Amino acid sequence: MQFLKKIVRPIVVVLGLLIGGIVILFGYQDLPLETLKETYANTESQFMALEGMEVHYRDEGPKTDSIPIVLIHGTGASLHTFDDWTYSLSKYRRVLRMDLPAYGLTGPFMDRNYSTQHYVEFIAAFLEKLGVKQCVLAGNSLGGKIAWNFTSTYPGRVDRLVLIDASGYPTGSSSVPIAFQLAQLPVVKQLFTFITPRFVAASSVKNVYADPQKVAPEVIDRYFELTLRSGNRQAFVDKLNTPVTPFSREKVMEIQQPTFILWGAEDRLIPLEVAQQFHKDLPNSTLVVIDNLGHVPMEEDPERSIEPVLQFLNLPSN
C-alpha cells in the first residue's frame, strides 16, 4: 500500500502540472461581446432580437429588391465568409447574411437545440421579421444543408437555390478539421470549451482550403476570436454532438426550384461525389466544379467562384 502511494502521488503531481501547463498555455477566457463588435461589426451591422438572441446580420444592396439573396455560412464560420461575394452581388441585388446561432457575434441558441429543423425555423423567423416573402437562398456546407431543407419545407419562399459544397448526403470525408474531431471526443469535448489552442483553429481553417498558403493570418484570427465569444465554444460542441436527422433523398428530389450547385474539386470534407449526387437528384440543377479549390470556394478564391453564380443569377460579370 505504501508503495502504491509513493507511485500514485508523483503521477498525480505530474498530471496536475501537465494540466495546469496546458491551461496556462492554451486556456482562453471568453472575449467580451463589445470588444468583438469593435473588430467584427461595422456600419452595415445590425442586431435583431430573435429567440432570446441578438442576431448579428447585414442588409446590403438596393432595398427595393423584392427577392433578396440570402447567404448562409457553414459550421464554425460567420457572415464574414461571404464578404467578397457580397461586395459583388450587392452592386445589383439586395443581399442578406447573418451569423447563425452558435457562431459569430450572435451566440448560442437559448435551448441548445441545434437540429437542422431548428435552423430552418430560425431562418423562416429571421426573414419574416424582415418582411421577406421570397428570396434566392444560398448556403455553404451546413448553410447549404439548411438552405435545401428550408426550400423543401417552404418551397413558396425560395425563388432559386445555390448550394456551395453543401452537406446532407451520408458520406465519408477524406480529411476532417481537427476542431471537429476534438469537439466530438468524450472528456476532450468538455475541455474544448475552455482550452482552445489557436493552432487548432489555424489547422482547421487550412484543412478546408485546397491551398493552405491562401489562408491569411487575419482570417485565422477571425475564426479563432469569434470562437471565444461567450457561449460559442459550448455551442460548437453541442452542434457537433446533435443527433443527425435521418437523411431523406425524397426531400431533395422534390425541390423544383432552379438550383446551382457549386463545388471545389479539392473538397476533402464533403467530396465531389456529393455534388454529383445532388445534381442527379435535383430535377432542375446545374453543376459547376472549380479546380484547385476546397470546401469554402467563396472564401478561398472569391473572384473565380462568384463568376458562375453571377451567370446563374443573370447578373453582369465582374
Image (spheres, rainbow, N blue to C red):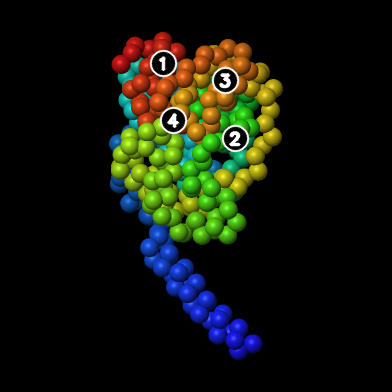
Residue named by callout 1: 308
Q: Quadrant of residue 113?
A: top right
Residue at 41%, 52% in the rendered image: 228
Pick whichever of labels 4 and 3 is earlier in the sequence.
3
| Residue at the far front in the pictured view | 3
User: Circle 4 sits in a helix, a strand or a loop, which is it?
Assistant: loop
Spatial CA distance of label 4 from label 3 is: 16 Å
Label 1 environment density (alpha carbons within 10 Å; few <14, some 14–19, many ≥20): some
In the image, what residue type sits under mark 1? Pro
Pick whichever of labels 2 and 1 is earlier in the sequence.
2
Does 191 sit left or right of 40 as displayed?
right
Residue at 52%, 51% in the rendered image: 182
Spatial CA distance of label 4 from label 2 is: 16 Å
Does 182 sit left or right of 209 as displayed?
right
Residue at 34%, 11% in the rendered image: 316
Residue 268 against residue 314 in the figure, above or below: below
Residue 276 numbered tag? 3
